[in-house]
Image (cartoon, helix red, strand yellow):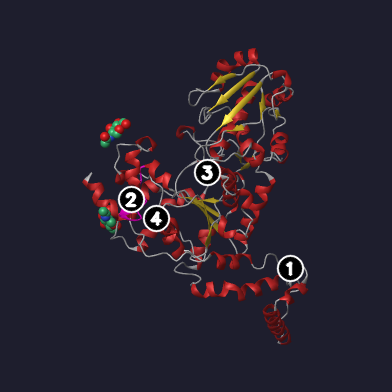
Amino acid sequence: MSKSKKNRHSYISVPSQIITPLSSSSLQNLLLSPKKPSKNPNRIFRNPNSLFIFLLFLFAFVGMAGLGFRLHPLLPFSAIPCEISEQHSSFSAAVSAVPVAGSVGEEEMEEFWKQPDGLGFRPCLDFSQEYRRWSEAVSREKTRYLMVVVSGGLNQQRNQIVDAVVIARILGASLVVPILQVNVIWGDESEFSDIFDLEHFKRTLANDVRIVSSLPSTHLRSRPVEEKRTPLHVSPEWIRSRYLKRLNKEGVLLLRGLDSRLSKDLPSDLQKLRCKVAFNALRFSAPIMEIGNKFAERMRRKGPFIALHLRLEKDVWVRTGCLPGLSHKYDEIISNERKLRPELLTGRSNMSFHDRKLAGLCPLNAVEITRLLKALGAPRNARIYWAGGRPFGGLEALLPLTREFPYFYNKEDLSLPGELEPFAKKASLLAAIDYIVSENSDVFMPSHGGNMGRAIKGHRAYAGHKKYITPNKRQMLHYFLNSTLSEREFKRIVKELHQDSLGQPDIRTSKAGRDVIAYPVPECMCKNVKKEMRHVL
Ligand SMILES: *[C@@H]1O[C@H](CO)[C@@H](O)[C@H](O)[C@H]1NC(C)=O
Ligand SMILES: *[C@@H]1O[C@H](CO)[C@@H](O)[C@H](O)[C@H]1NC(C)=O
C-alpha cells in the first residue's frame, strides 16, 4: 500500500497550466478551405488573394519554362488553387510555428508509416460443400424464427449480432432483424436500420441465413421461448441440444444478453460465417458511411494519418480501478467515486493501483500515449484523428498530446457547422463515425483494449493488414518509470517491444480465447488463395 502511494505520482506529468484550447476555427480553416478543388478554374478568381498568388505561380512557371525547365504535361492546374488558398489561410501560420520534421529522422518517419508484411494472407471465405448443401434448406426456412435483443455500446452490439447470425445458422432458423436495446448509459434509440445497411445485410447473408424484418403473421401469436441465461462459451452442440426441441415446438426463440455466450472456437465454416457477418454483411448505413468517409478524406488530404482510440473518459477510470494521473484533485475524485460505487469496478479489486498499472491493466494516459508514439517514430507533423468520448479533465487532459502533435482532431474539429447535427446525442451513430475514420487510417492505436479496438484490429487485418499498434503495456510501463534511462535507450527498448506485433499478422490461437473477428488469420484469411475461390461480395 505504501508502495502504491509513493509511486502514485510518478505517472503524473500533465502540467496544470491553463490550456489554450486549439482554436477550432483555425483548424477548420486549415482543413476545410477550400471545400473542394474547383473543377472550374474561373472560380479561383473570386478571391483576389488567390488571383494574385496564382499569377505569381504562373509567372514562375513561365520563367522556369523559359530557363529550360519542362512543365509536366499532366500537372493538374485545378489542384493549384487548392494549394494557394491554403497558404494564405491559417496554414502557413500553423506550419511556421511547427518544426516540420521535429526530432524524428526521415528514415524513422518512413518506418513509422510502413505497413506490416501480410505474409500473403488474404481473405478466403470458401465454405465447405456440406455447408453449401445445407444452405438451400436454410435459406427457405419459414417455420422457425430466432429473435435477439442485443445490448451495450455499438461494438458490443456488433459482436452480438455476429453471434446471433451464427446461432440462427446452427439452429437452421430464420433470423428476425436484431432488436437493439436502448442502453441506459448511452441513451441512443437508434434501430438496426439507422446504424446498419439492412438491405445489404440481408442480401449478403442470403445464402447463410434467411433474415426477415419482422415475425410473419403466422407466428405472431406464438409464445416465444425466452432465454436469458445462456452460459458462457457454449458449443453448437449445446445450442442444438438445448434449444432445438423447444424451437421446433414453439416456432419462436427469443435470446437476450448474447455477449460471449457462443464459444470462440467453432467449426471452420462457422468461423468463416462470423467473418462474413463482421467484415462483409455489417456495413454502416449510407448517411453514416458518407460522413465517415468524408472525415477520413479530410484527414488524408495532406498525407497519411494516425487514428487513436482514447479511453480517457471518467467512467473508464472508475471501472478499471486506475487513476488518470492528471493531478491529485482529479485522482481523488476518481478514488472517491470508486469507493461510493464499488460495484462498478471491473478490474481485479484487491490489486493496488500501482500493481494494476504495471500489470498493463490500465488505459494509457495522454503522457504515456505521447511518449509511446514518439518512441515508435511518429513525426511531430503527423496528423492524428482521435476517437472516443470526452476525456476526464477536459481538453487539459489532452495537452501532452496536442503539444507534441499539433495536428490533432476529432470529429467535431473536422465537421462543418451543422454537419454533425443529424448524429448529435446518438452515441451509436457517433461511435460508428469514429469507427469508419479509424478503419480508414494509415496507423491505428487504441489506448486500452476493448470491443472497438478488437473489432478494428480484425477489420484492418482483413482489409489488407493495415498497421495496428497494440501497446505492449505489460512490458513497457516499467521503462516509463525509469528516470535514469536515456531517451535514446528508452526508444530502442520500446521499439523492440513492439517489433513483432508490428511486423506481421497476429495469428489466432484458440488457447488465448481469441475471437476470429479480431484475429481473422488463419480461419478467414489464407495464403495462396485461388482466384475462383476468393470470396468476392
Ligand atoms: C486477490 O484476490 C484473488 C481472488 O479474487 C486471490 O486469489 C489473490 O490471492 C488475491 N491477492 C491478494 C494480493 O490478496
Ligand atoms: C533503469 O535503467 C537502468 C539502465 O538500463 C538500469 O540499470 C536500472 O536498473 C533501471 N532501474 C530500474 C528501477 O528498473
Give residue 368's mark: 4
Q: Which residue is mark 3?
A: 452
User: What distance separates the C-alpha of mark 1 from that of mark 3?
Assistant: 37 Å
Q: Looking at the picture, does residue 196 appear above or below residue 499?
A: above
Asked if the magenta segment contains residue 324, the reply would be yes
Amino acid carrying label 2: it is: Asp
Q: CA distance from mark 4 to mark 2?
A: 17 Å
Between circles 1 and 2, the one closer to the viewer is: 2
Identify the magenta region: 321-329
- Helix, strand or loop at mark 3: helix
Instruction: Of the two numbered discs 1 and 3 on the same chain, state the one appearing first in sequence.
Output: 1
Q: Check disc 3 and give the amino acid type.
A: Met
Q: Residues within 10 Å of mark 1 (few under 14, many from 20)?
A: some
Residue 196 occupies quadrant: top right
- Name the amino acid type tagged 1: Ser
Q: Report which quarter residue 242 is drawn in.
A: top right
The residue at 51%/45% (across/down) is: 453
Which residue carries the number 1 mark? 38
Q: Give the SS element for disc 2.
A: helix
Q: Are marks 1 and 2 in contact (CB under 8 Å)?
A: no
**In the image shown, does 254 or 449 lie closer to the viewer?**
254
Q: Earlier in the sequence, mark 1 or mark 2?
A: 1
